């Protein structure tokens, strides 16, 4: 193949929400490796087998970064998962930044599908993606188990 196949192949985009569980390594780790919640573990398991998925990660301030961006260890807010207070002002500010970030990402790459893997509270910081012309998958019902299963099935689809 002359390499053009890689340029024309349609890609998929995975957007992962922040995780309470984090690897406490002192060195910088890529965002996909720093966070260690259920959805990150599922994603890491399948990312090595698929070549058509780009990953964005929402960090604690609810803004998006590339999944390969190095992050230092930062103590999660609250004592347990779900203990973080999300202020409307923070959501609104992050939504503006995320809209710019995603517009740029979608301008650079054509995606056949976007999978959003996070809770509704975090997803409120994302812009409306229904008008981007790309199919959006957001399993918003059920607990972590069914959502993780949906993510696994998404990875296994060709």
Image (spheres, helix red, strand yellow):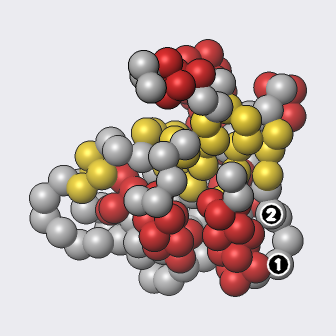
Tag 1's secondary structure? loop
91 or 109: which is nearer to us?
Answer: 109
Q: Quadrant of residue 138?
A: bottom right
Left or right, 14 with reference to 126: left
Q: Residue at x 45, y 70 (%)?
A: 45
Instruction: Find residue 95 and report its horizontal and vertical position in percent.
Output: 66, 35
Instruction: Find residue 111 and report its horizontal and vertical position in percent.
Output: 67, 32
Q: Which residue is label 2 attached to?
A: 139
Left or right, 52 with reference to 95: left
Say if residue 128 shows up in the picture: no
Tag 2's secondary structure? loop
Q: Residue at x 73, y 41 (%)?
A: 113
Q: Eyeballing the image, is 146 above or below 35?
A: below
| Residues at marks 1 and 2 touching, judged by CB atoms closer than 8 Å | yes
101 or 87: which is nearer to us?
Answer: 101
Q: Which residue is label 1 attached to?
A: 142
Left or right, 59 with reference to 89: left
Query: Whole-Å distance between the Cαs marked 1 and 2?
Result: 8 Å
Q: Pointer 1: residues within 10 angstroms few (<14), some, or many (20+)?
A: few
Q: Residue at x 35, y 71 (%)?
A: 22
């Amino acid at each position: 193949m002359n390499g053009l196949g890689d340029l024309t192949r349609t890609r998929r985009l995975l957007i992962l929400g922040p995780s309470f569980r984090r690897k406490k390594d002192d060195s910088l780790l890529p965002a996909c490796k720093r966070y260690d919640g259920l959805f990150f573990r599922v994603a890491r398991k399948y990312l090595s087998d698929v070549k058509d998925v780009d990953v964005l990660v929402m960090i604690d301030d609810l803004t998006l970064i590339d999944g390969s961006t190095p992050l230092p260890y930062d103590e999660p807010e609250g004592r347990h998962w779900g203990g973080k207070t999300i202020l409307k002002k923070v959501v609104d500010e992050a939504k503006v930044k995320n809209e710019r970030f995603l517009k740029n990402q979608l301008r650079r790459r054509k995606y056949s599908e976007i999978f959003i893997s996070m809770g509704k509270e975090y997803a409120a910081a994302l812009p409306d993606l229904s008008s981007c012309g790309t199919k959006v998958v957001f399993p918003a019902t059920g607990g972590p188990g069914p959502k993780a299963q949906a993510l696994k099935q998404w990875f296994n689809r060709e």
